[in-house]
């Protein structure tokens, strides 16, 4: 369903009326297209304190193809290197760097602050670096005009490992991602021969791919060069085949909760999988006092238990190739909770627990990374059926004052799936426009 309010605020009368009434004035987001694959304008490279990685960071920013400068009247992005900030007094340099230029940021611009992980041994450094998180989350809520803000924590001496993350955040692909803290390890990234097709030669399987977010994920992975296998329940076979045919992909009608699901997936990909996207999910909403056992069990089985069982079996069988990527779908409901969704929220919080526990062991034992996307209010057929006032609240209760699109989840998934994202592991990134819930 179209967001009529967003359309209204894009007109002159709508702007006047909403300004007078003090209502949200969302800016229509510019997402990736063939015609607009990159931000328009220069990247302003700033430094807080005496950083040791200034030149290396400048080289990485230049490699993205964007114009990097130390001064610009209307920058498309502000990148602040705050890795050297290690005292409370040092935070003044953060203010000094961004205060004079933040108003000049172009509509739909990006702010990326680079920090390091807070030290367990130096509480002054830990306080200063943790302060950056509060700073970035607040900045994301106040800059407006469709702009976003993120904090990227890099491992000491490993700024190069953050290239895929910086490419994603400094592009239209991250339009609905804001207020996020992303930690990047020192793992060496795999090479990407062609950034226009970073998944070329890789095989991906997407569950729940017949329609909605799953179909969009399959589409973006195929766009980026992957050979895609689209999986969904046999009851959705007509839509599944239609999606697969459109993408030149393979359709695999299969109930992911079946006992032999992992074996049938392995048989469908004899050369192994490089990317496994757990997107399949259901809702069976009802308050706990009115929720029969079958509603609880069905949601846990599809959304969580099938993910655990299938992942374990595919890793054990060696179906996930070394250098592989597992991307699961969580939800902000699993972070903040939601009325009438104790079963759904439990299943999605469980996904977050899976990611945090499995990620280091999968990387060490199998060379596979494990991450999750956590969507907020995404415009789908399911959300279109939500009552009007609840739907409008879902759209407006985030820093960008609008709902996201399935492609926003898909772009984030594709970033996780890239060969160059080896250092991105154990992360749960909200795709919610910086929702006010769980933020």
Image (cartoon, helix red, strand yellow):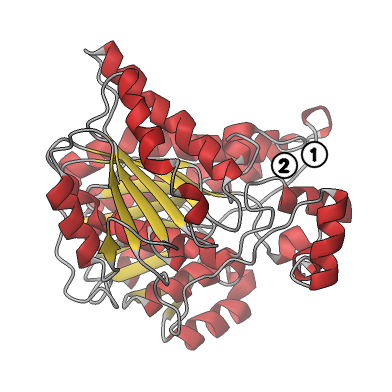
Give the left or right position of residue 408, taking residue 26 as reference: left
What whole-number distance in Å separates the C-alpha atoms at marks 2 and 1? 8 Å
Say what secondary structure mark 1 lies in: loop
Which residue is at 19% across, 51% downward?
57
State the residue in front, 435 or 64. Answer: 64
Across and down, in percent, residue 202 comes to: 26, 71
Q: Dots 2 and 1: beta carbons under 8 Å? A: yes
> Of the residues tagged 2 and 1, which is closer to the observer?
1
- Quarter of the rendering occupied by the C terminus: top right
Point 80% across, 33% down: residue: 287
Mark 1 Cα shell of 10 Å, populated few (<14), some (14-19), many (≥20)? some
Q: Where is residue 438 drawn, in percent x and y?
A: 60, 34
Question: Judging from the image, what secondary structure is the residue with disc 2 in?
Answer: helix
The residue under the point 42% across, 72% down is 40
Identify the mark nearer the N-term, 2 or 1. Answer: 1
Q: In which quarter of the image is residue 323?
A: bottom left
Judging by the rendered image, the residue that carries numbered circle 1 is 286
Residue 258 visible at all? no
**274 is higher (above) or lower (below) than 365:** below
Q: At which x and y percent is residue 77?
A: 40, 58
Determine the residue positioned at 27% across, 60% down. Answer: 69
Q: Residue 300 or 335: which is nearer the viewer?
A: 335
The N terminus lies in which quarter of the figure? bottom right
Horizontal side of residue 155 vs 432, given as left or right: left
Q: Where is residue 65 in the image (x, y as percent from the top left)?
A: 26, 71
Q: Quadrant of residue 189?
A: bottom left
Q: Which mark is residue 7?
A: none
Callout 2: few (<14), some (14-19), or many (20+) C-alpha neighbours within 10 Å?
some
Residue hosting label 2:
295
In the image, is residue 375 above or below residue 227?
above
| Residue toward you, 26 or 88 | 88
């Amino acid at each position: 369903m179209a967001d009529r309010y967003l359309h209204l605020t894009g007109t002159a009368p709508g702007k006047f009326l909403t300004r007078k009434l003090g209502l949200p004035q969302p800016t229509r987001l510019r997402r990736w297209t063939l015609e607009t694959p990159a931000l328009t304008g220069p990247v302003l490279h700033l430094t807080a304190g005496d950083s040791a990685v200034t030149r290396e960071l400048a080289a990485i920013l230049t490699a993205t193809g964007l114009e990097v400068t130390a001064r610009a009247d209307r920058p498309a992005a502000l990148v602040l290197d705050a890795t050297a900030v290690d005292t409370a007094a040092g935070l003044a340099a953060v203010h000094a760097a961004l205060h004079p230029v933040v108003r000049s940021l172009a509509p739909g611009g990006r702010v990326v602050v680079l920090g390091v992980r807070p030290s367990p041994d130096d509480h002054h450094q830990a306080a200063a670096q943790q302060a950056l998180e509060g700073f970035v989350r607040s900045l994301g809520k106040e800059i407006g005009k469709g702009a976003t803000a993120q904090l990227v924590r890099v491992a000491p001496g490993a700024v190069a490992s953050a290239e895929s993350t910086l490419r994603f955040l400094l592009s239209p692909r991250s339009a609905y991602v804001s207020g996020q803290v992303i930690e990047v390890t020192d793992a060496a990234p795999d090479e990407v021969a062609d950034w226009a097709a970073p998944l070329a030669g890789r095989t991906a399987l997407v569950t729940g791919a017949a329609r909605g977010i799953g179909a969009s994920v399959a589409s973006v992975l195929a766009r980026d060069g992957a050979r895609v296998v689209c999986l969904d329940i046999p009851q959705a076979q007509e839509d599944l085949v239609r999606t697969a045919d459109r993408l030149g992909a393979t359709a695999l009608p299969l109930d992911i909760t079946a006992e032999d699901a992992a074996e049938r997936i392995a048989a469908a990909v004899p050369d192994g999988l490089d990317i496994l996207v757990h997107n399949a999910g259901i809702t069976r909403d009802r308050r706990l006092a009115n929720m029969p056992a079958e509603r609880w069990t069905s949601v846990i089985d599809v959304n969580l238990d099938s993910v655990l069982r299938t992942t374990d079996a595919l890793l054990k069988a060696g179906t996930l190739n070394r250098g592989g990527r597992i991307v699961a779908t969580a939800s902000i409901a699993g972070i903040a909770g939601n009325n009438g969704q104790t079963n759904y929220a439990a299943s999605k919080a469980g996904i977050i627990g899976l990611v945090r526990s499995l990620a280091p062991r999968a990387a060490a034992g199998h060379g596979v990374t494990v991450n999750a996307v956590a969507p907020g209010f995404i415009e789908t057929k399911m959300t279109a059926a939500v009552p009007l006032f609840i739907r409008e609240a879902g759209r407006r209760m985030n820093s960008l004052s609008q709902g996201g699109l399935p492609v926003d989840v898909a772009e984030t998934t594709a970033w996780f799936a890239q060969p160059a994202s080896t250092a991105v592991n154990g992360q749960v990134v909200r795709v919610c426009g910086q929702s006010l819930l769980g933020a």
